[in-house]
Amino acid sequence: MNRPGNGLLLPRSLSMGRRDFLKRTAAAGFAAALATPALAQNAKIKIPLVSWMWNEPGRGDAWRAILAKFHAEQSDVFIEEAGAPFNEFTNNMLIQSQSGKINGALFHTTPDLVVRLLRGGHLEPLQDIVDKLGIGDKLSAAHDHLRIDGKVHGLDIVTVKFGLLYNSAMFEKAGLGAPASVEEWVETSTALTKSPDQFGIYSPHLMSEPGDFWFILQQWAVMFDGVWAEGRKPQVNTAPVIEGLKLFKTMYDKAMPKGTDTATANQMYANGRIGQQLIVSAAVNIWSSSGPDIYPSLRSVVPPGPSGKAITRIHPICVNAHASDDEKAAAKLFVEWLYKPENYQELMERCLDVVPPYPEAIRQEYLDKQFWAEGYLAGKSITPLEIMGDYIFFNQEFGNVVMDKFSEVLVANRPVEDAMADAQQELEKASERLFEGFTL
Amino acid sequence: MSGVWGHSGNIEPMFQSATAEAVEERLQRPRGWNRRNSLPYTLVFLIVAYLGVFILFPIAQQFLTSFSNNVVGVDKVTWVGLRNYERLFEDDDFWFAVQVTFTYMVFVVAGAVSLGLVAALLLNRKFRGRNLARSAIAVPWAFPEISAVLVFLWMCNPTFGVLNIFARLFPGIDANLNWLSDPNLAMPLVIALSIWKAFPFTFLVILAALQAIPREIYEAAEVDGANPLQALRHITIPEITPTLLLMAVLMSIFSFKQFTLIWLTTGGGPYGGITETLVLRIYQTAFRFFDLAYGATLGVSGFVIVLGLTLLFVYAQQRQDRARRR
């Protein structure tokens, strides 16, 4: 029952009139409309990048630009912003890890958080990426504590390293040069102090800001080659630690705005009322936007002290071991792309960072322009693992004991030796509980 | 008129028909689910579901966690029986935190209730600008805690805080005081801030109670020759005692749970846990030291203490009610 038409023999059922054509076109259009989002979704694997950095003005914008570049260069993987502000980030991640699985295939972590996630089995090995890029032997030593059986489980996206960041304009006005020794440092800090208008230095020292207080206090002992613990043995009553804390006390008495919180001190620093801060390199990014008046005057030196050492912490990007295979592959694709020198260089420049995870990750021309970076680059790196031993897993609890006893030194003039002897005793007692049944 | 839903559209029956026929008809209806009967259950279900999910489940979870060794990212979670409770009883820091908590609570409750009472008595009198004064006194309650703390921290700053300007007017004070870093001043300052923040609430409630006392009682007392102090002692105070008790209970619970003001001002310091209440200890243990199990154990102890306090106050109130009826 065929009939000819345009040289084709069509079955009657396939021929159609105008009405049929309109009906079928409408139906096809409707079906296509329904399918479009699904097709778009299938066209790319979408994975979230869980981070606190989206909420940070400088870094958030830098990461958005990097993601835009990644999306422009390929169309298989789409990465979305996810996460929480820094103050809630760690708790959110830990609560998720307690439930057995963290949401998101890709996440940023902090130095404290990453060791717990690693121990909890949440991190996928990234050694294949490192091997593929041929950077295995170039990767900074700060990655060592992220290795299990030689395989690295996280890759640094920002290294924060201590230095003494000072306002050179204030120094010049007072006819002072950058301090090269501890004695010089005390002298210049004292000379800069004209309380209550101007102070030589600030370091957090309030129990209401335990995070900042402990984070920076650790560096004071490192300047004298001190470590806070070796393995499971606390070392808070050793000579280098005592020396570091005595120096802090001297500075507190002579050159710090006592009882001042970090936010107020930062404002004072931005207004040129505080001369120096022992602070990490990543913080300079803040001054470039929030302290435009002092930013051109910022310079750094290695934290004064006989050791010349500076604590260096990495914040790794990690792939979730519990994500699906497709998600893991997508996440690794991004990490591999990010770790190519040209992309990582861009990330560093956008973030105003100066400590690369491997030498080729930073351009010398860029580095030469960072007038404030010299001290940060010159310090000898030491990792949190090296200064905290096995207490790296109990860093905050350890710090709380030290800070509590040291506060007595600051506000009640208790001798440092006595306070640290108490702290040592308390920590040794606590270690029995903390490490009971604990295996690395 | 049969069937499960049969009568539900009929508006007439329930209270109108007292006729035997209607009663009989109603009795003949099948027992079971119907729309009218389901409403209370639905409403109760919503409340129970809410309480179950958001209150009871977390409490149960906390109890369970307190019997484990749950330290985040350290070991596999296993049951450890009563070990955390043994640690609790041997933990000097816990007992010190309980002591600090009660000290803080007693002073805040006494301060907030008495200040609220005095303010309410004063502002219950008629004078020009009374409404403005009442509004102004409520401001601290409405002020966000974070902002209040920031202002307070600046005022207490040992280097350039305004409090030192006033302090140095006093004879014998020639150096700036350390205020929140001084072990003798930290707790009184935190208590003062807490009272300032809390008393407008007690003021408003007590003021409402004062306004509910019938005017005639005072008029009768006046006719009998009672002076204002006698009227206060024999009429006002007895009339508002239930309100004062209620305020004491609420303020005890509020001050027991207070976290923001203490954490942001002293963080439990200046040292030795001088201002570290149980709530701060729970937070530190669970969310800074990641020891969820012991944090939960401390939380259970806090729950028991608050429960005990509440029951004590309920008992006191009942006893007082009985005495009044006699």
Image: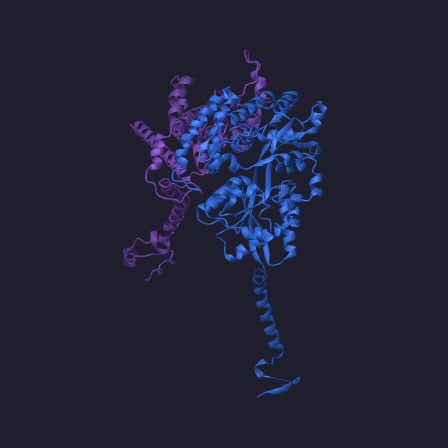
Which residue is found at the position 63% from the left and 57% from the top? A74
Left or right of A365, for residue B237: left
Asked whether A99 or B34 is in front, the reply is A99
Q: Residue furthest front?
A: A137
Between residue A125 and residue B23, name the one nearer to us. A125
Total tally of numbered discs in the picture: 0
In the rendering, at what x and y percent does residue A22 appear?
Answer: 62, 74
Viewer-proximal residue, B175 or A269? Answer: A269
Instruction: Give left or right: position of A94 versus A331.
Output: left
Q: Residue at left 51%, top 57%?
A: A325
B70, B158: nearer the viewer: B70
Residue B191 appears at what percent x and percent y? 47, 25
Q: In this view, does B180 lie above or below A94?
A: above
Farthest residue toward the top? Answer: B171
Q: Which color was chain A given? A: blue
The image quadrant of residue A85 is top right
Image x and y of residue B189, in percent:
50, 23
In the picture, the quarter occupied by the C terminus of chain B is top left
Is residue A75 something that shows in the picture?
Answer: yes
Q: Residue B91 falls in which quadrant of the image?
A: top left
Q: The purple chain is which one?
A: B
